Image (tube, rainbow, N blue to C red):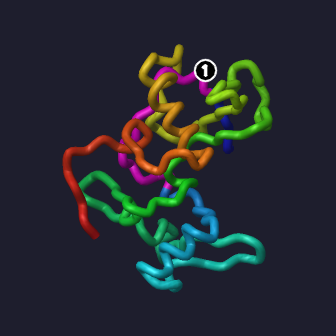
Amino acid sequence: MLQFVPWRQIADWRCTSCGSCCRSYSVVLNFPEWLRITQTFGSENTVIGLNKLFIKRSDDGNCAFLCRLGSSYLCALQSMKPKACMIWPFKLLTEPTYGEQKSALFDFAGKSLYIYADNHCNGLTYGSPSWEFSSLTLREFARIALGCFNVQHNSTRKSNTVFRF
């Protein structure tokens, strides 16, 4: 069952490269994201729904761009990763849609955001938010969600390895 947890119940978050998000969810694309992907990889890697654009899923049900490297999973779209993927497992909203308004409230650049995490992510550590999580990671997610920032440092898997697909 899908459940969203307010950010104040999370001590930290780190991507574990488990790939479960890429195996469990369909990625909705905005038009510029769809256009970049189709220009680079072709339209056969996307699906056009009635009112939404999606990344195609492989025959095994995974995202078409999910790649396995040993026991880790990687995204072949790193350089053009859709915003939905960049901010997962968090939902940044302008209304407290999933309740617990005070625990979800996050003030950012004069805006009130309500931040929730999808509890299906195994990279979440529950408890009192650490300084790094609340001051660096969540602020980066907010900048990405609001379109102010497009580069990930704290909101993605940290790796010294560069992968080219």
Amino acid, disc 1: Arg
Asked whether, in this view, residue 6 is left or right of residue 42, the answer is: right
**Label 1 element class:** helix
x and y percentages locating residue 107 in the rendered image: 66, 25
Residue farthest left in this picture: 161
> Residue 4, position in %: x, y?
67, 36
Residue at 34% over, 64% down = 67
Please give the name of the residue rendered at 46% of the width and 38% of the height, measured from the top-left corner.
122
Q: Is residue 7 above or below residue 70?
A: above
| Magenta range | 7-21
Residue 104 magenta-highlighted: no
Residue 160 at what x, y percent from top left? 20, 45
Residue at far top of view: 128
State the residue in front, 146 or 97.
Answer: 146
User: Dot 1 corresponds to which residue?
Assistant: 8
Residue 9 included in the magenta stretch of the image: yes
